[in-house]
Image (cartoon, rainbow, N blue to C red):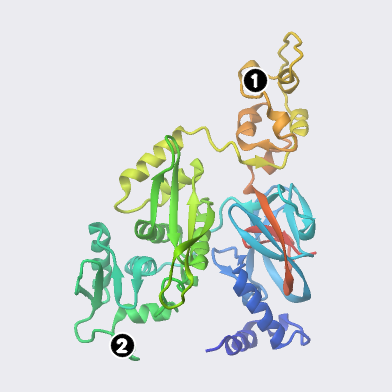
Amino acid sequence: MGFSAYLQSLCSSRQMDLFSEEVGWNSLLAAHDRFRETDATISMAFGNERSFQQLGRGDSILTLNEASYVLGSSKVVGVFDRGVSESINVKTAYRSVCCSSERQVLANGVWTDTKGIKRGDLVAVPKRLTFGRRLLPEYEVDLLALWLAEGHNYRISNQTPEIVQVMVDAAAHYGLVPTANDGLNWQLTNGDRTGGPQAGSKNGMRRMLERHGVWGLRSKTKFIPDELFDLQEQQLARFLNLFVACDGCICRRSKDTWALEIGLANERMLSQIGMLLHKFGIRGQIRHKVHNAVGRRSGLPFESWRFIASDPDALEAFASRIGAISKERVVQAAREAALASRGNCNSYLPISHDDFIKHLVYTPVLKNKRSCHNFKVARDLPEELRQGLTSWRKQTPSRVSQRRYAQLKGFSDGFFSAIAEGEVAWEEVTAVEQNAPARGWDLTLAGNRNFIYGGIVTRGA
């Protein structure tokens, strides 16, 4: 079914009353093209992700209470077309989101028009996304993870004994037997048909993959099915465990620094894997590389993308809640290093140094006046907290680091508790790029006006 036919069937059943008659199918299709390029979606209250076109009246989406910085939900009242306007691409180390210039982003603790965002601003993102309610058969989750990571049609390529055993056990539930092992590829057949492009194949794995819409896709065109975004925590952890075991690694980057890395030739699927990891509070950078080697058919250089998460909290969450089969030893080593770490000193809060100092409550410690800069920075602070403050205010006068806040929050009057300890993190904008004009969409909501769009807390103009 083409997208136009699909959209008409969708709107006739759920959304006809949400779109004005003036919008027209051409506008809807233009919007589809724009969002297909950016892959920006809205986070729902129950774990899945949807585009504007997929939303219906009464759907519950994830929102942020702006007073307490606690995540909640609001129901959709309407979806409307904002027309064509300039669009701006906002990039952080962890994500890239294309927004209408009229949309507002929660930046530096206040709502700011997208066109007013600049490099160095801190934008709000949820510390973690919500899990779904769906339960799939465990063998289906296992086979999906292995096939999406290292499968094509009836083949799965992996020789790690622990992973091969998982594949054999999962395939048995579909009546399949791994055969024709050439040292790299396992062919999964059911005995009476070896498979192929013919319709009506009796191969149970093929029927399952067709149901999820991924059958026949290759490494550059695969995607994560919507059903996986709806999974409960335990099953999603199992899926990610197997996927990382196939296409990821836990590597040592320096003496005391480890990182979770996942490399793919598919930017879309890697971004989706990042969104699934975000449900566990794991956020990472995605880096792009153009290789010297070129494809025989296309003649174009090979491209790859790599997800990298090196924050100690992210590594501890991965090790304790997800793990990776056959990689237990390095996962444990990374966890021990994360627990021994002092934390990430480059993670900041939208709180200025001087404002934070005003809300500290403590008994002053009298010291002899000195003429150096350090005396001004550390004045009246307890002796044990003066270490390391030499150039704190000089380096970052407009913001306080998460590490520094954790050290001093015991002396705070609680004024900044919500913004610092709520359910949002603050990511630094690394680039703001002007895009070509595009048609945009917006929401009206019952309750909180904001929503999570492409991982960033936004709201309409």
Q: Is residue 181 above or below residue 116?
A: below
The reply to whether residue 230 is visible in this rendering is no
Q: Residue at x 61, y 72 (%)?
A: 37
The reply to whether residue 340 is visible in this rendering is yes
Q: Nearer the viewer, residue 141 or 17?
A: 141
The residue to which callout 2 is attached is: 201
Q: Is residue 41 above or below residue 350?
A: below
Residue 156: percent from the left, percent from the top? 30, 70
Q: Residue at x 66, y 51 (%)?
A: 430
Identify the mark at residue 174; answer none if there is no mark: none
The Cα atoms of the two marked residues, 1 and 2, are separated by 71 Å
The residue to which callout 1 is attached is: 386
Furthest residue in direction top, as rendered: 368
**Is residue 156 found left or right of 284 in the rendered image?**
left
**Amino acid, disc 1:** Arg
Residue 209 falls in image quadrant: bottom left
